[in-house]
Image (cartoon, grey):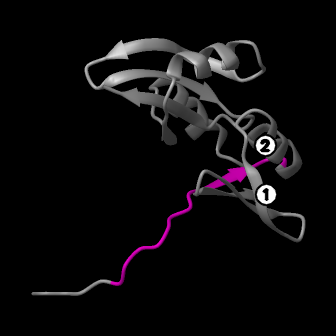
Amino acid sequence: MNTTYPKIKSMSPQFVVADLERSLDFYIRELGFDIDFRYEDFYAGISRDGYTLHLKSGSPAIEERANRRDNEHLDLVFSVDDIDGLFEAMKSRSPIIIRPLREMPYGREFYITDPDGYILGFMEEK
């Protein structure tokens, strides 16, 4: 069966967050995102370098967050340049680093968590 699908123009993961203001502050201050929009007091879209993330007020599943952290299941991976500089900057700021910078067969990476326990990986490919 030949099916034609429309072009995907963008994708935006959505994180359920306990405190929207705290999450916005983290992503803006620590990771350099900008606010694209806010909807009332419970939803926001943020972006950086053409990539977007949506944040929605709610109750993140604590057990799921703990399981993902224990098993290093990433919620989002950022491909970056100058991972050494980024890692040094992160070490001097407030993000919780759960996996220090390491060499892997596919490149170099490290992981942090956001205020709700979402695991964010940063990778520089070989």
Give residue 122's position: percent from left, percent from top. Answer: 51, 30
Label of residue 35 in the image: 1
Q: Residue at x 78, y 21 (%)?
A: 94
Q: Residue at x 75, y 13 (%)?
A: 92
Quadrant showing the N terminus: bottom left
Residue at the far left in the pictured view: 1
Q: In the image, is residue 54 above or below residue 21?
A: below
Give residue 80's position: percent from left, percent from top. Answer: 49, 34
Given residues 70 and 81, the one toward you in this image is 81
Q: In the image, is residue 42 above or below residue 91?
A: below
Quadrant showing the C terminus: top left
Is residue 58 at all visible to an observer of this figure?
no
- 32 with respect to 118 (left or right): right
- 104 with respect to 51 (left or right): left
- Circle 1: residue type: Ile
Is there a contact, CB below 8 Å, between mark 2 and mark 1?
yes
Which residue is identified by label 2?
Answer: 28
Give residue 111's position: percent from left, percent from top. Answer: 54, 24
Is residue 32 at all visible to an observer of this figure?
yes
Label of residue 88 in the image: none
Q: Main secondary structure of the magenta part?
A: loop
Give the crowd class for mark 1: few <14, some 14-19, many >=20 residues within 10 Å. Answer: some
Give the crowd class for mark 2: few <14, some 14-19, many >=20 residues within 10 Å. Answer: some
Give residue 39's position: percent from left, percent from top. Answer: 83, 71
Q: Residue at x 69, y 18 (%)?
A: 89
Magenta segment, which residues?
Answer: 6-19
Given residues 24 and 65, the one toward you in this image is 24
Magenta segment includes 22: no
Secondary structure beneath disc 2?
helix
- Circle 2: residue type: Ile
